[in-house]
Image (spheres, rainbow, N blue to C red):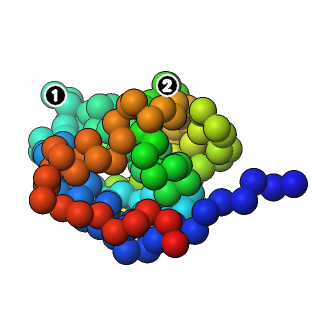
Amino acid sequence: MPLELPTPNPAHLDAVRDLCNRSSYLQLLSIQMTALELGRCQLKMPVQDKHMNPFGGLCGGAFASMLDVASYWCMYPQIDEDMGATTLDLQMNFLRGITGGCLTCEARVKKPGRNVFLCEAEIFDDAGRLAATATSKMFLSPTIQPISAAVASVDPSLVLPPKFL
């Protein structure tokens, strides 16, 4: 029997997406979360000089940041309201050098679990060519990075709508 998933509140997911887009780290890298829904997250990042390694190509850390952030948030809509998570591992494959343009990262939940989620993410260039992939395991715990910690860090005055309908 398949696991029955709660229905995420679209207003909550919109508020969380907006909160993420105001976070210091995503702003530092010019990463914009463009979609957050059940089992899926999408990010966009215009490649800029600040993302480049000394050889003129996109730094692997910029790839890793996109893959890790998207992997985390794609599983967020499926976890309990007060649950938090952290990355256990991130296994990446860099497939194409990037020197400019705008990157799109798509992440999805491959296998949800009670304590660990398996997620997959891919980065595409402007031409739709696959540039990097990752698989990630996310460890769930009520004591690790709950959404209340993100709200306290970015905007303590924010009151999120209920997470589930």
Residue carrying label 2: 89
Total label count? 2
Could you tell whether 127 is left or right of 60 in the image?
A: right
Q: Could you say which disc has been placed on residue 92 in the image?
A: none
Residue carrying label 1: 54
Could you tell whether 78 is left or right of 104 in the image?
A: right
**Residue at point 33%, 48% (across, down):** 147
Q: Is residue 67 visible?
A: no
**Residue at point 51%, 34% (across, down):** 140
Q: Position of residue 52 (x, y in %)?
A: 19, 38
Query: What residue type is disc 2 on?
Result: Asp
Q: Position of residue 92 (x, y in %)?
A: 49, 31
Query: What residue type is disc 1 on?
Result: Pro
The 10 Å Cα crowd at callout 2, few under 14, some 14 to 19, many 20 or more, is some
The 10 Å Cα crowd at callout 1, few under 14, some 14 to 19, many 20 or more, is few
Q: Position of residue 95 (x, y in %)?
A: 49, 38
Q: Nearer the viewer, residue 24 or 63?
A: 24
